[in-house]
Image (cartoon, rainbow, N blue to C red):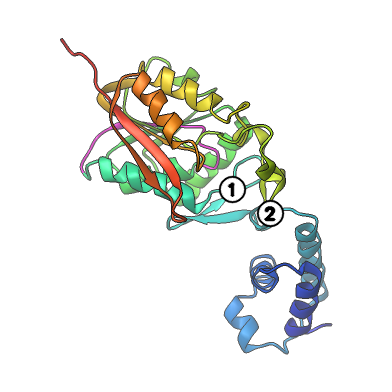
């Protein structure tokens, strides 16, 4: 049987990309249960035939373009390790910026009603539920398969103050009002060349693509949100790096105030939101 060092060297030659070493070590750790520190300390250790087969299968899937997160079945987000499948968008660090902006606006002792639209793996809703345990979070998604993953992640994280509803955007919660509505919607134009790059070809189209300019979902969410926000309630949206001005215009047109845009960790405009001031008289 080959040693750890031999197996990793062969894997790196097959992957060839700039992250070949990191990816091969990660796959060996996740698929075969051999930590990266163990790999470093015991390079001459031999693997079993079963481990070799498992690792070889994972490498072949990666060469074919399957995202690491789908191969390992998990992705880190915030301080959680979330289950992911091809039924959900892979959580990304940019979305942590959206969560940060939400938490800055939710008092620690708040008992708010909060809606997470298009929850996918449940990443946003789970962080908000854990960080603001007195709040009541409801997470919606059109995909039943995605909700299965989100519910399982909630169970694994031991989160109780969260519920789930199936349907498109506000449809399953049409009679409810919220202090905050948050969403990472699809926002990529249908002909955007980025859709052919990185992990995007393997991810669900409905979680990525939104019309000719990428703003179809955002338009609907902003328009419908005014019927579901309590006075001074917040709407926070993730969007494309070049969409902040247009999203700001859409919010202004629906009467939102205190509109802001924040950048992601790469310095790109990524999160825009505001509050809906209503006449209570």
Up-down relation of residue 94 to residue 232 (above or below): below
* Secondary structure mainly formed by the magenta segment: loop
- Is 171 on the left-hand or right-hand side of 68? left
Q: Are marks 2 and 1 in contact (CB under 8 Å)?
A: yes
Q: Earlier in the sequence, mark 2 or mark 1?
A: 2
Residue at image position (37%, 25%) is 251
The image quadrant where one finds the N terminus is bottom right
Residue at image position (82%, 83%) is 2
**Percent of width and height locating residue 23:** 67, 68
Q: Is residue 144 magenta?
A: no
Up-down relation of residue 96 to residue 143 (above or below): below
Residue at the extreme top = 281
**Percent of width and height locating residue 250:** 41, 24
Q: Is residue 118 magenta?
A: yes
Crowd rating for badge 2 (residues with CA inside 10 Å; few <14, some 14–19, many 20+): many
- Is 62 on the left-hand or right-hand side of 256? right
Up-down relation of residue 76 to residue 215 (above or below): below
The reply to whether residue 275 is in sight is yes
**Percent of width and height locating residue 176:** 36, 19
Q: Which residue in the protein does label 1 denote?
A: 90
The reply to whether residue 116 is in sight is no
Crowd rating for badge 1 (residues with CA inside 10 Å; few <14, some 14–19, many 20+): many
Q: Which residue in the protein does label 2 denote?
A: 67
Q: Regarding mark 1 in the picture, which secondary structure is present there?
A: loop
Residue at image position (74%, 78%) is 8
Up-down relation of residue 248 to residue 37 (above or below): above
Q: CA distance from mark 2 to mark 1?
A: 9 Å
User: Closest to the observer: 116 or 269?
Assistant: 269
Residue at image position (51%, 46%) is 153
- Is 152 on the left-hand or right-hand side of 29? left
Numbered-mark total: 2
């Amino acid at each position: 049987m080959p040693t750890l060092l031999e197996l990793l060297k062969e894997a790196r030659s097959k992957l060839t990309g700039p992250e070949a070493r990191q990816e091969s070590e990660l796959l060996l750790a996740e698929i075969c249960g051999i930590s990266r520190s163990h790999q470093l300390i015991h390079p001459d250790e031999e693997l079993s035939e079963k481990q070799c087969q498992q690792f070889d299968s994972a490498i072949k899937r990666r060469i074919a373009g399957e995202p690491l997160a789908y191969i390992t079945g998990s992705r880190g987000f915030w301080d959680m390790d979330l289950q992911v499948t091809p039924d959900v968008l892979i959580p990304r660090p940019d979305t942590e910026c959206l969560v940060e902006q939400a938490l800055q606006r939710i008092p620690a002792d708040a008992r708010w009603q909060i809606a997470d639209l298009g929850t996918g793996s449940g990443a946003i809703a789970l962080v908000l539920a854990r960080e603001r345990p007195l709040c009541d979070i409801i997470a919606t998604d059109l995909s039943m398969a995605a909700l299965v993953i989100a519910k399982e992640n909630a169970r694994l994280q031991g989160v109780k103050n969260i519920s789930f509803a199936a349907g498109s955007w506000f449809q399953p919660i049409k009679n409810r009002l919220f202090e905050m509505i948050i969403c990472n919607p699809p926002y990529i134009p249908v002909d955007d060349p980025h859709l052919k790059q990185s992990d995007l070809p393997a991810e669900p189209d409905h979680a990525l693509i939104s019309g000719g300019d990428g703003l179809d979902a955002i338009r609907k969410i902003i328009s419908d949100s005014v019927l579901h926000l309590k006075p001074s309630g917040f709407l926070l949206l993730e969007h494309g790096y070049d969409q902040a001005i247009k999203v700001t215009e859409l919010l202004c047109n629906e009467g939102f105030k205190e509109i802001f845009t924040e950048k992601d960790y790469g310095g790109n405009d990524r999160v825009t939101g505001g509050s809906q001031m209503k006449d209570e008289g």
